[in-house]
Image (cartoon, helix red, strand yellow):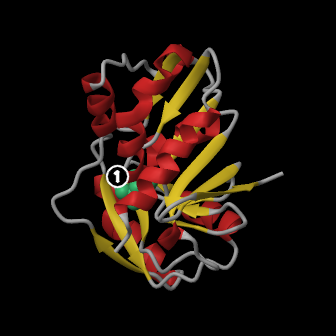
Amino acid sequence: MADTNEKRHAAIKSLEYIEDDCVLGVGTGSTVNFLISELHQVRHKIKSIASSSEASTKLLSDEGFMVEDLSSTGSPDLYIDGADEITKNFHMIKGGGGALTREKIIAHASKKFICIVDNSKIVDVLGKFPLPIEVIPMAKSMVSREIAKLGGQPELRHDFQTDNGNLILDVHNLKIIDPPSLEKEINNIPGVVTNGIFALRPANEIIIGNAETTEVISNT
Ligand code: 5RP
């Protein structure tokens, strides 16, 4: 069970990366929620904010921030988000909260992506965490069959609809040896909106929260 202090420490450290006039992209999840609750500290530096989910938008609005559409903000200077797993090659599995598509769009649009995680998220190989795939509802059975051919066991996430009105398949037991090629291969299946491998656009920095401190790893 992840320590909430570790998540909080990683989130607070990321505030240091927000510079004057920043167009900020905000991710989704319990680690990002700590960021949102501390964001008032750097309010004067933020020019505009794009959000990756309705949940984060609501929390940001509650904190008095006006969230804008990505099409109006333009490319964020910085995107800050969590992950379900991350390797020291900066590849991630994301989408535990089901926000993977909007997260991937903002990550792709952003000049810099900082991933904030607790220690439990660091892995050598991706795939122990079930890989989320957002699918168009009519394609769920067909996509499930294609995923089974790749060796995975897809499970429909029950009672869940994404912010885009789609479904999530959580895929167990995939061995993700080559994250960029598997990301492409799964995204090529018709009906897949996107999958939770974030390797084609990896993170630029990882902030790992520990019990007392933080560790920063940069992708230079
Ligand atoms: C949501 C995500 C989150 O970044 C991921 O699930 C990590 O969440 P948490 O910070 O709660 O551990 O990808 O879609």
Q: Is mark 1 within 8 Å of ligand 1?
A: yes
Residue at horizontal 36%, vertical 50%? 29
Indicate whether 156 appears above or below 77: below
Q: Residue 7 placed where, x, y %?
A: 43, 56
Instruction: Name the residue furthest right.
Output: 220
Indicate whether 66 appears above or below 176: above
Q: Nearer the viewer, residue 15 or 80?
A: 15
Q: Residue 142 placed where, x, y %?
A: 38, 68
Indicate whether 183 appears above or below 32: below
Instruction: Name the residue furthest front.
Output: 212
Q: Amino acid at mark 1?
A: Ser
Q: Residue 213 placed where, x, y %?
A: 56, 58
Q: Secondary structure at mark 1?
A: helix
Image quadrant containing the N terminus:
bottom left
Q: Is residue 60 left or right of residue 181?
A: left
Residue at horizontal 34%, vertical 52%? 30
Q: Nearer the viewer, residue 82 or 16?
A: 16
Q: Nearer the viewer, residue 147 or 38?
A: 38
State the residue position of label 1.
30
Which of the 4 quarters of the picture holds residue 141?
bottom left
Which of the 4 quarters of the picture holds residue 187?
bottom right
Residue at horizontal 46%, vertical 85%? 173
Q: Is residue 192 left or right of residue 18?
A: left
Quadrant containing ligand 1 reads bottom left
Q: Residue 64 placed where, x, y %?
A: 31, 18
